[in-house]
Amino acid sequence: MFPTARRVLGSAAGPLLGRGASALGRCRRRRLLSTLAILEQRDGQLNLASLSAFTAAKKLGGTVHGFVAGSKVSAAAEQAAKVDGVEQIIAVENEAYEKGLPENYAPLLVENIKKGNYTHVISGHTAFGKNVLPRVAALLDSQQISDITSIHDEKTFVRPIYAGNAIATVESSDPVRIITIRGTAFAPATPESGSAAVVRGVDPKPESMTEWVSEDLAKSDRPDLATASKVVAGGRGLKSKEDFDRVMLPLADALGAAVGASRAAVDSGYADNSLQVGQTGKVVAPQLYMAVGISGAIQHLAGMKDSKVIAAINKDADAPIFQVADVGLVGDLFEKVPELTEKIKSS
């Protein structure tokens, strides 16, 4: 009986020891993980949407640090330090980094990544992130993983491909994983009761062959398109810039919504390219997305199909937009939209 008992104990203890060792290994790996979240700022004001990087970083586990650079960034760093679960904010004060020029910002990041010995670097999949992080990845000899929407574990990530028609699960074996995240998939962290330390980062002061000359920004008192809870977007069906402004702007003001546009409307000059929604524009996921005169090309759907409620107005009952819309109205937008605007105002 004793040999039998020993065999039973051995067969039962083996898996238990294996599971225990596996769990211990996972705990050790999580302790060794360290993530640097890249934050964006403008004129000393923290871009709150960039705090999505903290949300993604905390899903990985391990140590979470933030990084911000530019002129007069101390206030932005202090605000980011209030996010719970963040241990440290690295700040570099230098006018040279204010505009985020990749030629000098990428070497700056690389020096701080090496100093901190980070295993992951996360930024938003924004114009800034798409401009800077590929250079960082190249300098670190890593392959960037772009526009992820989910994190399985420290080396496995999910990202859409083919304008969102297919989902790829990507596993990376690079020692430093360079990642950009889709902001609509990770809610921005909220600065609350955190007390992270703010420390001075390494500034290599790299020479740059480029300089910032000027910028021409579209200014608006309406909500920011990328973070607005309501968006009204116009398409080619509006026929002209004058009609776009006449029809869409009162509707946006009545709803308190941001204004967006399809690529066709932008290419036709109806709206500024900063308002473009789609695969080659901004990806949004508001509570309400109202598509006016937009047929629903796959490239546009890739930028808004995660919206909570999609409403569409189009005179073509067979327009593809109605296949994804929760609410649809078939009719002449030049009649229906002003009528809708007046009803919203009166209510």
Image (tube, rainbow, N blue to C red):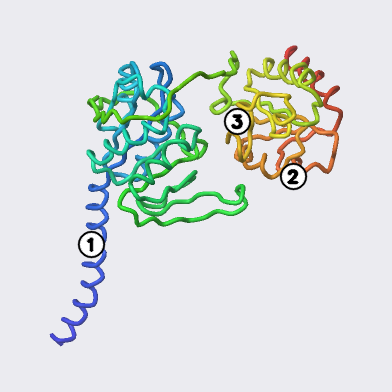
Q: Are marks 1 and 3 in contact (CB under 8 Å)?
A: no
Tell me if mark 3 has few (under 14), some (14-19) or many (20+) residues whose alpha carbon lies within 10 angstroms of its own: some
- In the figure, 319 relative to 41: above or below? below
Q: Quadrant of the N terminus?
A: bottom left
Residue 207 lies, in percent from the top left, at 33, 30
- In the figure, 13 relative to 4: above or below? above
Q: Nearer the viewer, residue 103 or 180?
A: 103
Q: Which mark is residue 173?
A: none
Question: Which residue is disc 1 drawn over?
Answer: 20
Q: Earlier in the sequence, mark 1 or mark 2?
A: 1
| Spatial separation of the CA atoms under disc 1 and disc 2 | 49 Å
- In the figure, 186 relative to 346: above or below? below
Residue sitting at 53 percent across and 19 percent down? 215
Q: Quadrant of residue 190?
A: top left
Q: SS at mark 3? A: loop
Q: SS at mark 2? A: helix
Residue 22 lies, in percent from the top left, at 26, 61
Q: Please state which of the two labelled residues, at mark 1 or mark 2, is closer to the viewer.
A: 2
User: Left or right: where does residue 163 sit relative to residue 235?
Assistant: left
Q: SS at mark 1? A: helix
Residue 206 lies, in percent from the top left, at 31, 31
Q: Earlier in the sequence, mark 3 or mark 2?
A: 3
Q: Nearer the viewer, residue 8 or 297?
A: 297
Q: Nearer the viewer, residue 74 or 256?
A: 74
Residue sitting at 78 percent across and 14 percent down? 342
Q: Nearer the viewer, residue 1 or 224?
A: 224
Three-letter residue code for mark 3: Gln
Question: Which residue is disc 2 drawn over?
Answer: 323
Q: Are marks 1 and 2 in contact (CB under 8 Å)?
A: no
